[in-house]
Image (cartoon, rainbow, N blue to C red):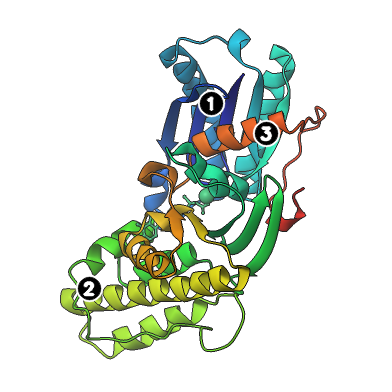
Amino acid sequence: MIILGIETSCDETGVALYDSEKGLIGHLLHSQVDMHSEYGGVVPELASRDHIRKLIPLIRQLLCNCHLKSANLDAIAYTAGPGLAGALLVGAATAKSLAWSWDIPAIAIHHMEGHLLAPMLEPDPPTFPFIALLVSGGHTLLVEVNGIGQYQLLGESLDDAAGEAFDKTAKMLGLGYPGGPLLSKLATQGAPNRFKFPRPMTDRPGLDFSFSGLKTFTMNTLHKTQQNFQDKADIAYAFQEAVADTLTIKCRRALQQSGLKRLVVSGGVSANNQIRQTLTAMTEQENARIYFPRLEFCTDNGAMIAFAGCQRYLAGQRENLEIQVNARWPINKLS
Ligand code: KG4
Ligand code: ZN
C-alpha cells in the first residue's frame, strides 16, 4: 500500500511517498525560508501563494522520481492542522481534489502527530509506550504515548514555544530568520561560564514550560554589555544552555513519574546539537533510550505526514469530501 503525504502547514512544502511494506520510497521539500527572510519571519499570505505554486509540480516530480503513477497510490495524507489556515487550506484542497479525481481516500493528519511519529521512519524505531518531547516553532509538548492516537498531554508551554523563543532571541541578537539554527551556530563561539540564565519553572513540581521570561532576560543581559560579537555569542551560548537544561529537567521528571524508559524527541528544535547532547546524557543516567528523527526530518517534511497517514489508513480512518482545516487543534483531542 502506497501513501502520498503532503505538508503545507507553515513555510515548507513537503511531499513524500511511503510504502507500508518497503518504507519511505521518496520525498521532496521546497523551503520558503529565502522568501520570508526578507521580512524577518513568515508572511502567511506569501506562504499560501507559494504552496499553490510549488505543490503540484513537487508531487509530479516525486511520482516521476519514484517511477510511479497516480494509479499506484492507495491514499493521500495531508496536514489538516495546526498551522497557518491559508497554508493548510492549500494542502487540504489539493489532497481532497486529487483524492476525489483518483478515487482514493484522503486522510487528515495532525501536524504534531506527524512530528511525534517521525522517529519511526528510522532504523530501530521506538515501540509504544514512550514519552515524547515535541519542540517546534509553534509548540512545546510533553506527551505520554501509548499507541497511535493515544496521547496524554503531560505538559506544555504556557507562553512561547521553544522554537519561538529561539527565533525571538535570535532577532534580538541581530540574527536572521529562522533564528534557531543561526543562534545555535553563534553559540558555538560562545564562552561557557560568562552568563547564567534561569531554568524557568524547574523549581516547582509539574511538567509545563515557560520560555517568554528568557527573552526578557536576554534583552536585559544584552543591554548590560557592549553588544559586540563576543557578547552576543556568549549570550547565545547561555540562552541555548538554559533551554537545553530546562527541557532536560522536565523530560527526566516525565520519565521518572511515568516509569517509562523510552524518550522520543522531535520537531524543529530537536535538530539542535546541544539539546540532543544534553538529553542523551540524561537518558543514559536514567537507563533510558532516546530516539530522534534524522536531522532533515526534525523540521517540517512530507515524510512524517505520509508515515502518519499510513498508520491512520491502516487503523481505518476515512473522511468525506469536505475541505476543512483546523488551525488550532490540541493533540489530546485526537483519538
Ligand atoms: O517543526 P518546525 O520545522 O516547524 C513547526 O512546526 O513550527 O520547527 C521550526 C522551529 C523554528 O522555530 C526554528 O528556529 C527551530 O525549529 N529550529 C531550531 C534549530 N533548527 C530549527 N532551533 C534550535 N536549533 C536548531 N538547530
Ligand atoms: Zn512542524
Percent of width and height locating residue 240: 34, 71
Front one among 30 and 42: 30
Image point (57%, 32%), residue name: 306
Please, which residue is most extreme toward the front here? Answer: 287
Could you tell me how far apart the alpha carbons at marks 2 and 3 are, in whole angstroms? 42 Å
Which image quadrant: the N terminus?
Answer: top right
Tell me if residue 107 comes above or below residue 274 in the rendering.
Answer: above
Residue 92: numbered disc: 3
Mark 1: amino acid: Tyr
Question: Quadrant holding ligand 1?
Answer: bottom left
- Identify the disc placed on residue 51: none
Give the mark toward the camera: 2 or 1.
1
Residue 199 position within the rendered picture, expressed as x and y whole percent measured from the top left: 44, 83
Circle 2 is placed at which residue position? 233
Q: Is residue 113 above or below residue 231?
A: above
Report the side of 180 relative to 308 (left or right): left
Q: Are marks 3 and 1 in contact (CB under 8 Å)?
A: no
Residue 211: percent from the left, percent from the top? Answer: 50, 76
Query: What whole-number distance in Å separates the C-alpha atoms at marks 2 and 1?
Result: 41 Å
Closer-to-camera residue (179/142): 142
Residue annotated with mark 1: 18
Q: Is residue 220 left or right of residue 108?
A: left
Q: Is residue 135 visible?
A: no
Secondary structure, mark 3, is helix
In the drawing, does residue 303 fall left or right of residue 296? right
Mark 3 vs mark 1: give the one in front: 1
CB at disc 1 and ligand 2 closer than 8 Å: no
Q: Residues within 10 Å of mark 3 (few under 14, many from 20)?
A: many
Residue at 50% across, 34% down: 303
* Mark 2 neighbour density, 10 Å: few (under 14) some (14–19) many (20 or more): many
